[in-house]
Image (tube, grey):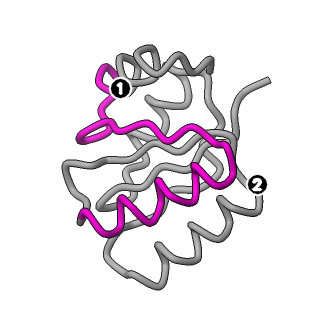
């Protein structure tokens, strides 16, 4: 069963979404843009409520405060948050492997 995944990045990218889904065998159920603090806060609450199994963070595009908000929610929920610079396929795969997260 694939993991319900949230990607936090600077913008929606349908091509990258497909690459990540197919290449990593994950189910990207949501992709959130980092441009609005209210949106990030809402996703942090969804994480705490258990809506996702995995969170991929495009930290190369994020404010540190947004990253900490998401990572804190993941810690609270016991959900892995994986830092993957710009969220490209190879970077995500390596980051997931280094965290020991099975996709």
**What secondary structure is the stretch in magenta mostly built from?**
helix
Looking at the image, residue 68 lies above or below residue 87:
below
Task: Write the residue at 57% across / 67% down.
Answer: 44
Quick one: label 2, few (<14), some, or many (20+) residues within 10 Å? some
Note whether 2 is above or below 71 in the view shown: above
Question: Could you tell me which secondary element the residue under label 2 belongs to?
Answer: loop
Residue 21 position, x and y percent, is 55, 31
Instruction: Name the image quarter holding residue 47.
Output: bottom right
Neighbourhood count class around disc 1 (C-alpha, 10 Å): few under 14, some 14–19, many 20 upward: some
Residue at 30%, 32% in the rendered image: 88
Q: Earlier in the sequence, mark 2 or mark 1?
A: 2
Considering depth in this image, is 92 or 78 the residue closer to the camera? 78
Q: According to the image, label 2 marks what residue?
A: 50
x, y percent for residue 98: 40, 16
Q: Which residue is mark 1?
A: 89
Counting labels gives: 2
Please state the extent of the stretch shown in magenta in the rendering: 64-91
**Residue drawn 69% across the image and 52% down it:** 77
Magenta stretch encompasses residue 30? no
Q: Is residue 71 magenta?
A: yes
| Quadrant position of the C terminus in the picture | top right
Task: Find the distance from the CA under tag 2 to the CA under tag 1.
Answer: 25 Å
């Amino acid at each position: 069963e694939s993991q319900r995944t949230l990607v936090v990045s600077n913008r929606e990218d349908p091509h990258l979404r497909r690459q990540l889904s197919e290449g990593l065998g994950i189910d990207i159920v949501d992709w959130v843009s980092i441009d609005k603090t209210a949106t990030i806060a809402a996703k942090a609450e969804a994480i705490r409520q258990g809506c996702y199994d995995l969170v991929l963070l495009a930290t190369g595009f994020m404010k540190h405060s947004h990253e900490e908000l998401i990572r804190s929610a993941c810690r609270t929920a016991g959900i892995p948050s994986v830092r993957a610079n710009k969220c490209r396929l190879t970077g995500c795969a390596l980051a997931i492997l280094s965290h020991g997260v099975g996709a």
